[in-house]
Image: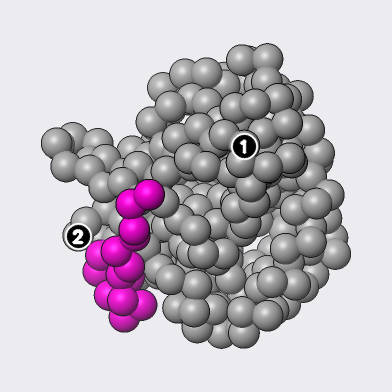
Amino acid sequence: MTTPIYTPLSDAAAALRNDGYALLQPQDVAALAGVPLAALNDLVPSWDTLELDNYLKDGGRYRRRRHSCFVQDGRHLTQTAHRAHWQPLEYNALHGGMHRLFEPVLPATVTQAAWPALITAIGQVCSQARNSNEPWYVEAHQFRIDTTDGIGRPTPEGAHRDGVDFVAVLLIAREGIKGGETRVFEADGPNGKRFTMTAPWTLLLLDDATVIHESTPIQPLAVHGHRDTLVLTWRAGAFQGEGTSP
């Protein structure tokens, strides 16, 4: 298991701009959001309520999720009407071109103070990296990858970009598994990093234009092994599928 090398919180925007990614340790994520870790942990039980992803083209039943959309303007976050998730085939060869309508993030989750605090704080780092104050179109995905049927695949589409401006992957939990190594590669170069996120609320923040990413499959070490993540994306101009290029 490769140990992560963390980015100092003060360097997060510069690392995102210059290196294409930043990796923050949990206490810095809480500091960035301006809430105690305990407030972030109050969100965790909602991962036990996720619904089965019925769109997996590999026939698997290892992924549960919820999905909701928001518009961020500075520190103000507004939830939009519920909408389908859509990606073009060029970014997701496995599931692109499909309008996938998932169950929304529960209101009891969205209304906790830590939820908008976390999303808007990370979004402001993205704005600093881009040197822009324009609104962001944000998609939030709660994921649970389990090992009930053996192998669970966090990224069944393989190494990919998401077709947005920035992507955040927050580890929520690892229970009774091995694997799940995170890999980040230059989109147009030879360099890459690989590490395993193990501490809850570790944050990987990615510039989607300059890097590609994936997580390796997980295998069970115990009954009901699973890996929970919160994946957030920020896109300027519009949500994907609304006629605006990233």
Structural crowding at the residue carrying mark 1, measured as other residues with C-alpha within 10 Å and reported as few (<14), some (14–19) or many (≥20)? many
Q: Is residue 124 above or below residue 181?
A: below
Q: Amino acid at mark 1?
A: Pro
Q: Is residue 172 magenta?
A: no
Percent coordinates x, y for residue 193 in the rendering: 26, 47
Q: Which residue is mark 1?
A: 220
Image quadrant in which the C terminus is located: top left
Report the magenta residues as a range: 1-15
In the rendered structure, which amino acid carries the disc numbered 2? Answer: Asn
Q: Is residue 209 above or below residue 155?
A: below
Is residue 6 on the magenta stretch?
yes
Residue with the mark numbered 2: 18
Callout in the foreground (1, 2): 1
Residue 131 coordinates in the image, percent (x, y):
31, 67
What is the x, y in percent for residue 88?
49, 24
Q: Report if residue 35 is visible in the image.
A: yes
Name the N-terminal-most of marks 1 and 2: 2
